[in-house]
Image (spheres, rainbow, N blue to C red):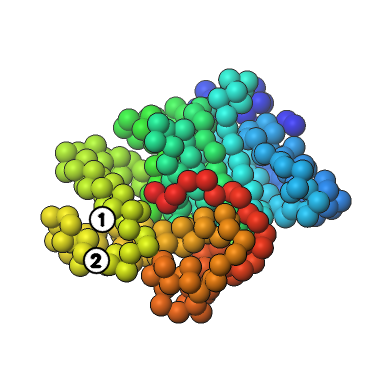
Amino acid sequence: MHTFWQDPLRGDAARTAAWARHKEQGSADTALSRQRFSVAGEPRERQLPAWRDRLAGMLEVPVAPAQIAGGFHAELDTYVLPDIVYLDSRTGPTMLQRSAQKIAADDMRDYCFHVLMEGIAETEIGTAQRRPITQFVPGILALDMGRPMTMRRPTRTRALAFFLPRAVVEAAIPQAESLHGKVVGYAAPSTRQLRAHLQDMCDALPAMSDTEASRALHVAAELILAAFRKAASQSHSPRGAARAAMLGRIKHYIDAHLHSQELVPANILGRFPLARATLYRLFEAEGGLHAYIRNCRLRQAADELAGSRSGAIGELGGRLGFNYAADFTRAFRRAYGVAPQEFRASQSRWLEQRCE
């Protein structure tokens, strides 16, 4: 498959120069190419392999024989500018990888900014701890395409991806080499503006003229870089490092007490030397402390459901802090797109790591 990073006219240097021209001239380049892809026209047994083949120039899509017969849903809109490549994908449950072998075989070295609009994604970046980075709430995940990663999407997902030249990102963000696996949420006013822009843009883009689409994509890319630049400047300060360390400790505590009815803010405050307002601020990017705990418990529930074919759903919810089976079922359906019973019946085995 002929893909944008294999085109010698769109190498990193040429794309970086195109970005610089845009910045200097203050106008968007209208040399825009649009592509639409869907597996809907394929026989059911060819749908997942067709998706794998479509992404083969960039990513590996593991395909198990048992997955093929059931068919697969995938749609992909691609927008290629001289300096930016933007993808809008809508897929069923799937896994995406960039292995060390794949990286060694190609010259794809962009930074990818993965924007989760619907669904859940867990990404493992091959660190020594092998703990997944989980996008529980809409947010933006930075990935260095020159480094390994595995992304699991357990539900129907809509995701946007911005591919930017390596030199552009490294010029815009200090210590860009540390971006791989970092997630920026939408708690700050600046990132709330970004979220609103992305929500408006992704649905309107197909009807935009090339000039309008190019302008919207450049604005989005610049807002994304600004958000990660601000996050990087905060995390590299002594205060930011201390906050990150404390957040990590609290997350480990939460992970170890998911089955405890005592996992409440008051007890967390008793365990860690923090003011209540500080504790809540630490989890703003996660959608709030209560949302983070709930999502971790739902993640644990999915893990247990995938590994067991028996047991009362209500009892599982009760062990994980849900007082009523109906509350648990509603929360699980909102998070995973299906009821707990349906999830277990599907015998999903995609979950391999516990919640971060």
Give the residue type that dot 1 points to. Leu
Q: Position of residue 219 (x, y in %)?
A: 46, 49
Give the residue type that dot 2 points to. Pro
Residue visible at 72% across and 42% down in the picture: 64
Pointer 2: what residue? Answer: 265
Kindly give the residue lying farthest to the front in the view shown: 310
Question: Where, by quadrant of the figure, is residue 236 drawn?
Answer: top left
Mark sitting earlier along the chain (1/2): 2
In the rendered structure, the answer to whether residue 283 lies left or right of residue 49 reads left
Q: Position of residue 283 (x, y in %)?
A: 30, 58
**The one of 9 and 35 positioned closer to us in this rendering:** 35
Q: Position of residue 244 (x, y in %)?
A: 25, 45
Callout in the foreground (1, 2): 2
Depicted 247 relative to depicted 130: above or below: below
Residue visible at 66% across and 63% down in the picture: 345
> Could you tell me how far apart the alpha carbons at marks 1 and 2 are, in whole angstroms?
12 Å
Pointer 1: what residue? Answer: 282
Depicted 14 relative to depicted 200: above or below: above
